[in-house]
Image: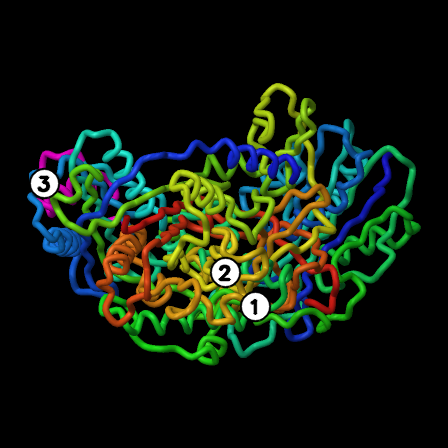
Amino acid sequence: MRNVVRVAAYLPVGSSGGSRVAAADEDEFTLAATALERAWSNPADAVEPVVVHALGEFPPMVDWGFAGVLGREVAVIRHRPTASELARALRSLEEGEGGHAVVVTAELPERSSDADPAKPPAPGAAAVAFMLAASNKSRPFSLSKGTSDRSAVSSALRAKGSDAEATPDATFIGDWDASPGKGRPIDAEATRRAANRDLSGRSEGAYVPRPRYIENLPSRWRFGAQECDACHFTTFPARGVCRRCGRRDALTSATLPRDGLHVIATTTIGKGGQPTEFDGQVEAAGPYDVALVEFPNGIRVTLQVTDTVPGRVKVGDTVNTLLRRLYPMEEEWRYGRKAVPVDPSTR
Amino acid sequence: MLRGFNESVDKTVRGAEALVHRAAIVGAGHTRFGALEDGPRTLVRAAVESAFRSVDKGADRKDVREAFLSTLGFGGAQIGNSAAVLAEEAGVVGVPVTRVENACASGGFALRSAVGAIASGATPLVLVVGVEKMTDVSNARRRYWLGVSGDTEWERLAGLTFAGVYGLIASRYFAEHGDASEALAEVASKNHENGALNPNAHFQKRVSRSEVLSAPRVADPLGLYDCCPVSDGAAAVLLASPEVARKFTDSPVYIDGVGAGTDYLAVQERAMLTRFRATQRAAHEAFRSAGWHRSDVSFLEVHDCFTIAELLALEDLGFARPGEAAALTLSGETRRDGRIPVNPDGGLKAKGHPIGATGVSQAYEIYLQLRGAAQSRQVAHASHALAHNVGGAGATATVSLFSVG
């Protein structure tokens, strides 16, 4: 029997009516992906294949999306988000053979378009993502800190962990300790409206053909780059050719760090200054910041800033990055990384 | 990584072979810039007619054996084959016409192509027309087209239009050289003051520095008055070889040197945000081919699509040391009566920026100024002028040098 060795959870920073609320650019996929990638950051996990038990209402794209996040082949098994389904998934996790298996779940508030805006979100209208990883190492686990007790999923997780001990390498991410209401206030109704918007016909033509979007996923989602063994130059975004010496046959895949990036330049896009693809976002969440950020090796990337009050991020600040919704195109959401200030006072 | 970038660019600059040949402007025409009722065909026709009318000794359309059309194709109504539209409206159907598209620098590159055509000896007269019709499309479509010339995937779809990219650049400039908000406001205020004297300008009213500073923010630190307007308009020039120029006029304006350059499309790939390598390369090439010094220049027409761009231009073109363009601007030296006047026609900021027309419009203004025909906005003792035209946020650029002798 194998043991669950790592637990990662991600809770949205925003709050409304005492509940945690996902921002307009978060959804089930980004919540789960964030927990997944944080728990999977250990190089010792480089074992294949990986089975992901997905509990919840995930969009169909997670079948390839989780693989895109992890940068490895992944088999996705879907479950309904109930305690019994979770128990079943955990059982198969423990009994599974050949490589790693994870359980990932995310829970979002009802996104009914006819919700009463005056009514506060119902209890349980919180978003939470957990990731549990199993391996052959004999380490027990527990969720050592209180989780959301509002959902069947989290109750089941707590029940599972109650008779186990805390494990030193359990990873907790997100604003785990904060009491509800401490996070960034969010207009939950506006967020719901944004999430419900018709995905078609919003772009006036800034067009990234889907094959190019898919081709650039490693760079867009994981900061995938290519290091040249001949001249030691790092090319980002990866283009299959060294930007300095032009060699194609001496490239090694590399991943640039997703945390601890340095802000080189920043701007706040006011209403009307945004490309049309971001109209829905501005309508739901108001002005936003965009920053040019630098990796430790000097490579730069332009990222939108999220989970912060616009105008707070300054040149010289440090940011981490998270996978979020970027823009809708061809009737689907396109995803990519956004920057989040490390210093909570800038949020 | 950054060192490698710099080395390669420096090598490019050092290795730039200057185009050494001259051409003469013998006629220039211009429409009003602004939100106009006229469509693009009418604008082209008006600019061409105005250019032919301006030729002192007259010119025959039959002498035009080659033409260049500068346009982005804004709005998408006629993206392909718009060269034929120019042939029709200019009355030169049959003559080869090439459309040149390098975003906002299309005009400068069209002019450069025309100089090359003159040098080839194939034609005694070349027509260059720049046009853009921008105000007849929906707000959403306009915002799309305003961003179409930037990097689509990594910049625009991170949520940036060009205002946003220049907002990033301005924030970086402030971080490197201190807050320059007051200088940016002075750029806008000065150019509006010049525009108020230009009957073709989109905006012909003065704006105070405090109005600029208190305007709504579009892409902080840039506000509404830091951005050029969305304008319709066209401009045209007639270029002749120096040998035949005096057949058309006794006072031609010569193009003594042209330079051009490119840079990475996305600013994230560049080593520096506050320098446009394309401008630096273009300036280096133009000055070398003309054999001029910076001190020869009487006034500048620079690409001030956003106020910060005028500060960058002064530094990249070699008229201010890095970080010192703000002080130069605040000293009043770039005003029309200053030591080195910048944008006496109001610049893109006040005159307007019909994308494809801008580079040609700069040549028109210089044609007037160097012939002493700029009336109330005339720069005193103007004999040598520089035109600087930038595509997008510096991915392409041209510099052209003009003189009366």
Amino acid under disc 3? Val
Q: Are labels 3 and 2 assigned to the same chain?
A: yes
Q: Residue at x 60, y 58 (%)?
A: B172
Label 3 or label 2, whichever lies nearer to me, is 2
Q: Are marks 1 and 2 in contact (CB under 8 Å)?
A: yes
Chain of the residue displaying label 1: B
**What residue span does the magenta drawing correspond to?**
B76-96
Q: Position of residue B13 (x, y in %)?
A: 51, 37
For marks 1 and 3, give the CA distance: 49 Å
Q: Residue at x 31, y 51 (%)?
A: B359
Indicate the quadrant containing the N terminus of chain A: top left, top right, bottom left or bottom right: top right
Local SS, label 1: loop
Q: Nearer the viewer, residue B194 or B69?
A: B194
Q: Position of residue A150 (x, y in %)?
A: 72, 64
- For residue B403, the mark is none
- Graded by Cα atoms within 10 Å as few (under 14), some (14 to 19) or many (20 or more), the crowding at tag 2 reads many
* Tag 3 residue: B92
* Tag 2 residue: B311
Q: Nearer the viewer, residue A241 or B15?
A: B15
For marks 3 and 2, give the CA distance: 41 Å
Question: Looking at the picture, does residue A30 appear above or below residue A64?
Answer: below
Q: Are marks 3 and 2 in contact (CB under 8 Å)?
A: no
Amino acid under disc 1? Ala
The answer to whether residue A331 shows anywhere in this view is no
